[in-house]
Amino acid sequence: MIVRQFLQWIRNAVPGDRAEATAALARAYLYSDLSVDDRAAAEGAMIMLLDDPSPLVRRALAEALASAEEAPRVVVHALAGEQPYVALPVLERSPLLGEADLVDLVATARAEAQAAIARRAPLPRTVAAALAEVGSAQACLALLENPDADIASFSIDRIVDRFGHLASIRETLLARPDLPTATRQTLLSKLSQALAGFVVSRQWLEPAQAEHAAREACEKATIALAAETPGEELGELVAHLRRSGQLTAAVILRALLSGNVAVFEEALAELSGLPVDRVVGFIHDRSLAAFRALYEKAGLPRTAFPAFRAAVTAMREGALLGEPGNAARLRRGMVERVLAACAAEQDGAAAPLLALLRRFAVEAARDEARSFCEDLIAPDALPQPHAIGPMTIDARLVA
């Protein structure tokens, strides 16, 4: 019997030769026309080879059996529990490992083995959920990069919670066209926190300064994101901001002063519990007393009301019409008008509000100047060489 001869020979063979012979035995089991007795003997020999002291031999066995549905199930399951070097081919490709098997393996496997499972095609949703919950960063990255993985939205949120601070995870997530807007905003928040931590670790800023700068940068990016968000998703983004504690008066005021009235409306609806259409009526069609009642129902700070009142009054008078900019950037005219109105009240309790509005004014002025300069040097704004007398610009530069 061939298997008997194999077993006698393998006792004294070196690991490399044993590995080659093991792979040949596994291929013979899968593809040769063996008798029933020879087939049973070959399976017994492979089970015995699971105890071979050389990982080369066990890896060769795993490589040969990894993709085969006809492989001995007991051998495949034993190989799946091996050290990663041996187990990776089976974990990544074997059709004999079911969902329950893979979920159990994820819970106990090392990072490399988890990543191999994450690369499977197809990868069921239950296994993806297990990887998102307990998998390593390496495994979660492999999961996100797997086009054949069925990943539920709650699993993506879990990965963001656990590893959103890592650049590789963050960039891969942001490249997904199906990523919900609320999740994108969470990644923006994670990025701002990571940058603040980096700046503090380098001792470039004090912790309080870094945190303040990161928060304002996140708020600015959030309004920019909201400007690109489809109307049907805007309510969910605002609800996410409230759940995460980010729907502050500063964010809402920034949205209004940027001309992003839709975010302002959704925010007041979310905070007040009133339908959006009623909130729109209070903001646009009724008296300032009605707006004040809505503002108080939303629970926003009283000290900030003068700024919102001035902004709503300016909006009703058409101040947003014709002003350069978009819904992602503060409108300079609106900011300066609101700042002047609040400063005229001379309320000592409004000092923090005035400081915020002054920062808004500086930001708006810088953005406007930057935009003006970019337009000024745009290629289509530059004069053509032949338009400057007989000597061209190029000739003058050469001279």
Image (cartoon, rainbow, N blue to C red):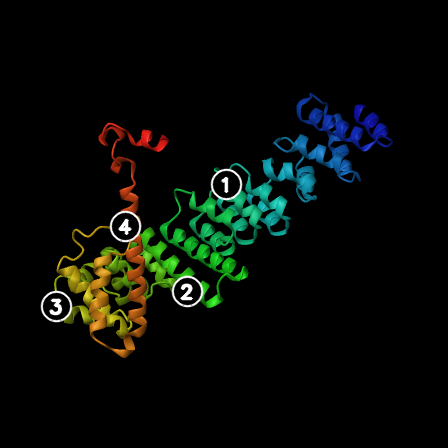
Residue receiving disc 4: 232
Of residue 136 and residue 214, the one placed in the foreground of this image is 214
Assess whether mark 4 and mark 1 are in contact (beta carbons under 8 angstroms): no
First in sequence, mark 4 or 3: give its number. Answer: 4
First in sequence, mark 2 or 3: give its number. Answer: 2
Marks 2 and 3, how far apart at CA:
36 Å
Residue receiving disc 2: 212
Q: Nearer the viewer, mark 2 or mark 4?
A: 2
Assess whether mark 4 and mark 2 are in contact (beta carbons under 8 angstroms): no
Q: Position of residue 169 (x, y in %)?
A: 50, 48
Assess whether mark 3 and mark 1 are in contact (beta carbons under 8 angstroms): no
Would you identify the image quadrant in which residue 358 lies? bottom left
Query: Which residue of the protein is positioned furthest toward the top in this rendering?
Result: 33
What kind of residue is marked 3? Ser
First in sequence, mark 2 or 4: give its number. Answer: 2
At horizontal 42% and vertical 60% (from top left) the residue drawn is 214
- Residue 287's tag is 3
Work out whether 118 lies above or below 331.
above
Q: Is residue 24 left or right of residue 246?
A: right
Q: Nearer the viewer, mark 1 or mark 2?
A: 2
What kind of residue is marked 1? Glu
Marks 2 and 4, how far apart at CA:
31 Å
What kind of residue is marked 2? His
First in sequence, mark 1 or 3: give its number. Answer: 1
Marks 1 and 3, how far apart at CA:
53 Å
Residue receiving disc 1: 145
Marks 1 and 2, how far apart at CA:
34 Å
- Secondary structure, mark 2, is helix
Q: Position of residue 168 (x, y in %)?
A: 51, 46
Of residue 238 and residue 118, the one placed in the foreground of this image is 238
